[in-house]
Image (cartoon, rainbow, N blue to C red):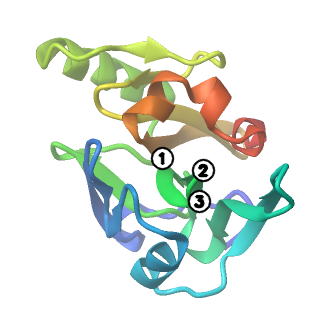
Amino acid sequence: MGIWDVKRDSERAQWVFVPQVSVGPLRFGMAPDEVSAALGSNAPACRLVQRSSGSYELVEAQFTKLGVTAYYAMGQTLACVAVDALAGPQVALDGTALVARVPSEAEDWLCNHTEAYELDLIYTHAADPGSGNLGLILRAQRAGDIVLTRPLFLIREWAENSWDCIPGEEWARF
């Protein structure tokens, strides 16, 4: 697979998103070792931060081969899952695929979905559409000369306050 190659849906694992509960085999609130076990990997690329107490805390674990990044809240619980547009699993909500889609079409779907179910529609500081009710933000990710959706699946608190909660490294990924 080349640097800008995008997997076809038929080549991806197929996951289901249950808002505020789970993304595929991952449940919000899981500990890092539970996430690794659920993904079948014990050695993700991790980023730790040192707290004022001198202790280290896991902030992010990248499962590069799977195209999944897990973000942890203080207290070491899973709070956000980012799915890579190029190589991550396909994640569906109510039968609609959310990964590697044309951003404008995904935004139209989200607008219609939130209106039909009377859910909130929010936009991040980067103009990414989302919904706190769903715990979903539809980011865009570069794939060569095009961009495709890189969804973030989050706990409600993070969706409503994404700028403060999501690590800066996520916002820097294009």
Q: Residues within 10 Å of mark 1 (few under 14, many from 20)?
A: many
Q: Residue at x 21, y 22 (%)?
A: 113
Disc 3 vs disc 1: Cβ atoms closer than 8 Å?
no
Could one spot residue 86 in this view of the protein? no
Furthest residue toward front:
53
Q: Residue at x 73, y 73 (%)?
A: 45
Quadrant (top left/top right/bottom left/bottom right) for the C terminus: top right
Image height of 167 relative to 158, above or below = below
The residue indicated by pointer 1 is 100
The amino acid type, in three-letter code, at marker 3 is Thr
Could one spot residue 159 in this view of the protein? yes
SS class, disc 1? loop
Mark 1–mark 2 distance (CA, rounded to whole Å): 30 Å
Q: Residue 172: give x, y in percent of width and height.
A: 78, 38
SS class, disc 3? strand
Lateral position of residue 95 relative to residue 22, left or right: left
**Mark carried by residue 89:** none
Quadrant of the image occupied by residue 128: top right
Q: Residue 121: give x, y in percent of width and height.
A: 35, 14
Quadrant of the image occupied by residue 112: top left
The amino acid type, in three-letter code, at marker 2 is Met
Mark 1 vs 2, N-terminal side: 2
Q: Residue 35: give x, y in percent of width and height.
A: 47, 73
The residue indicated by pointer 3 is 69
Mark 3 vs 1, N-terminal side: 3
Mark 3 vs 2, N-terminal side: 3
The residue indicated by pointer 2 is 74
Disc 3 vs disc 2: Cβ atoms closer than 8 Å?
no
Q: Residues within 10 Å of mark 2 (few under 14, many from 20)?
A: few
